[in-house]
Amino acid sequence: MQDINFEYGKQYRAQKKVNINTGKLKDFLKNLGLVALFIIALVFLIRSFVFTVGEREQVVITQFDKIVRMIVDDINEPSIQALKNDPRFSNIKIQEGKGLFFKVPFIQSVRRFTNQLLTFDTEAEEVFTRDKKIILLDNFAQWRIVNPVSFMVNIGGNRETAHLRIDEFLYSKMREEIGKIDAHTLIADKDYVMNMLENVEDHINSQLEPLGIKIMDIRIKRTEFPDETKPSIYEQMRSERQAVATEYRAQGQKQARTIQSEAERNATIIEAQAYEEAQKIMGEGDAEALKIYAEAYNVDPEFYEFWKTLQTYKSVIDEDTTIIISPDSPFAKYIFGK
C-alpha cells in the first residue's frame, strides 16, 4: 500500500512539473511572436520611408498619381533642362545620383526605369534608290531613356510604344536619305553610308527629344536586292562599272598622249638649244684653231707644212688603206723621205 501511494505521488509531481513547463513555453512563444511581428512591422515601416536607386536605374516618384520628383543619371541632359522650362513640370524636383533616398510613406510611389542601352531591331523593308532600284534594307538602333518623366508622360513609359515611334521616324528619314543616292553607293561606299547614318541619327534625336529617349547608334545589318531582281541589277551594275572603267582608261590614254607630246616638244627644244650651243662652241673652237694655226705658220712655215701633212696622213691612212701615188707627188714626199 505504501509503495502504491509513493508511486502515485511521484507521478503527480511529474505531471505538475510538466504542466508548469508547458505554460512557460507558451508564454515564451507568445512573446517571441510579438517581437517578430514588431520587427516585421518596423522593417515595413522603414521600407515605406526609404528606397534605393541602383546603378542601372532612374526613378520617378509620384504622389497620388502626380509626378513630384525624379532621380536621373545626368541632370544636365538637354531634355531634362528643357523640362525645367515647361510650366507643366515646374514643380518637379530633379535629383542626380544613386543609393538610398527618402520618400513620404504610403502616399508616394516609386516607378523605376532602366538607364541601359536598349536595342530596336527592325524588320527588313524595301526602299527605292535614286536610280529606281529596290533595296531590301535591314537595320537596328540602340537607344536609352534619358528623361524618365517625358518618357512616362508622353508614351506611357512603354518600350513597345517607344519602338513604334522610333520605327516611324527612322524609316521615314532612311527612305528620304536613300532616295538621294544610287544603289551602288549604298552598297559599296561605306564612308558615305556612315555619314548618312550620323545625319539620320541627329535628325531622329531632334524628333525624339520631347519623348525622353535618345538614339545612341544606328547600324545597317543588311542591304541586298530582292531575289527576283538580282540578276538584272547585277548585270546593269557590271555594265555601269565597265562604262566607268572605259571612261577612266580613255582619260588616261588622253593624258598619256598629252604628256608624251609635251615631253617630245620639250626634248626638241632642248636638242635645238643644245645643237645651237654646240655649233657656237665648235665655231669658236675652229676660230681659235685657225688663229693658232696662223700663228704657228707665221713662226715656222716649213714645220707647219710638215705637221699638217702628218695630220692628213693620220686621217686618211690606216691599216686597211691602199694608196696608189706617184713618188714625186708633194703629198708623198715625207713618206719617201724626200
Image (cartoon, rainbow, N blue to C red):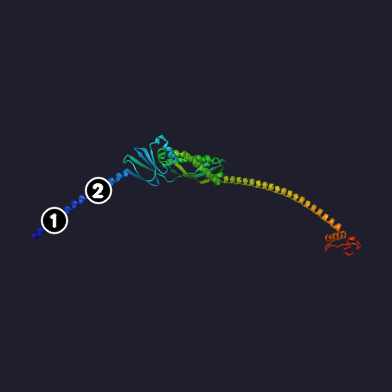
Left or right: 232, with 108 as reference point: right
- Give the residue furthest to the right: 328
Where's the C terminus, which quadrant? bottom right
Q: Residue at 28% across / 45% down in the picture? A: 42
Q: Which residue is mark 2?
A: 35
Residue 319 falls in image quadrant: bottom right
Q: Position of residue 69 (x, y in %)?
A: 37, 40
Residue 236 falls in image quadrant: top right
Q: Position of residue 133 (x, y in %)?
A: 55, 42
All told, the count of numbered labels is 2
Q: Under tag 1, what secondary structure?
A: helix
Left or right: 327, with 88 as reference point: right
Residue 226 visible in the shown view: no
Q: Amino acid at mark 1?
A: Arg
Q: Measure the alpha-carbon separation of dots 2 and 1.
A: 34 Å
User: How dense is the environment of label 1, judged by Cα within 10 Å: few (below 14), some, or many (20 and up)?
Assistant: few
The one nearer the camera, 258 or 183, is 258
Q: Residue at 86% across / 57% down in the picture? A: 298
Q: Amino acid at mark 2?
A: Val
The one nearer the camera, 267 or 273, is 273
Labels 2 and 1: the sequence-earlier one: 1
- Give the residue furthest to the front: 299
Q: Which residue is mark 1?
A: 13
